[in-house]
Amino acid sequence: MIFYHKFEVRWSDLDANKHLANSSYVQYCAQSRMAFMTKEKMGVTQLSRWGIGPVIMHERYSFFKEIYADQTVIVSLEIDGCSEDSSIYRFVHKFYTPDGVHCATAEATGVWIDMMLRKMTTPPDDVVEAMNKYKSPETIVMTREDFKKLPFRPDNVDPAEFTL
């Protein structure tokens, strides 16, 4: 199953090139995920009751066609990767015009965290059931090892190096 969420592109969503700003793509994806979670009865109130929250660890985008002000854009949501216990997930979002033109694709990898412990956790069965509805036969099984494959790793520096 695929979830779709519709947006009307506002002037404030644009950048200096008069097309949808990169930051707006991030916001549209986040809002699509929240709309999906609300529809599946795991919105902000329910997440608070469960004491969990979704955290995006890595996000990447590919852009194919510009999106302009006053256009309608439809953002899809599918789960293309998930750990067996659903503690790790990967959403794929596709941006379409109403006539079906594919404008961009985003991929967001994340985890569920325990809001008190601030550590990765297994979500309640209700979340697992909702997420399972949006998997496809191609959805891969993810593990913690998949985080090692992400392109960036932390690399601390000596603050004395900062020449501000």
Image: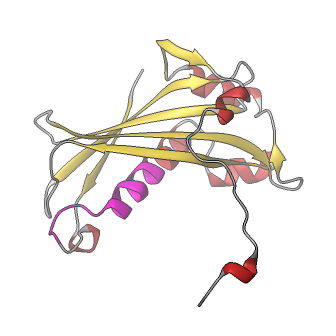
Q: Which residues are magenta?
A: 17-32
Q: Is residue 84 above or below residue 101?
A: above
- The figure's colour scheme reads secondary structure
- In the picture, the quarter occupied by the C terminus is bottom right
In the picture, measured across the screen, residue 13 lies left or right of residue 44, that is left
In the picture, measured across the screen, residue 96 lies left or right of residue 38, that is left
In the figure, 106 relative to 139: above or below?
below
Can you give x and y, in whole percent of width and height, for residue 96 in the image?
Answer: 21, 39
Image-quadrant location for residue 156? bottom right
Quarter holding the N terminus is: top left
Q: How many marks?
A: 0
Residue furthest toward the top?
Answer: 137
Residue 162 sits in quarter: bottom right
Quick check: 71 above or below 145?
below
Q: Is residue 83 left or right of residue 31?
A: right
The answer to whether 135 appears left or right of 160 in the picture is: left
Question: Image point 55% across, 41% down: which residue?
Answer: 151
Of 25 and 157, which appears nearest the observer? 157
Residue 146, x across and y down, in percent: 65, 29
Judged by its main secondary structure, the magenta piece is: helix
Residue at 50%, 34% (x, y): give it: 91
* Magenta highlight on residue 141: no
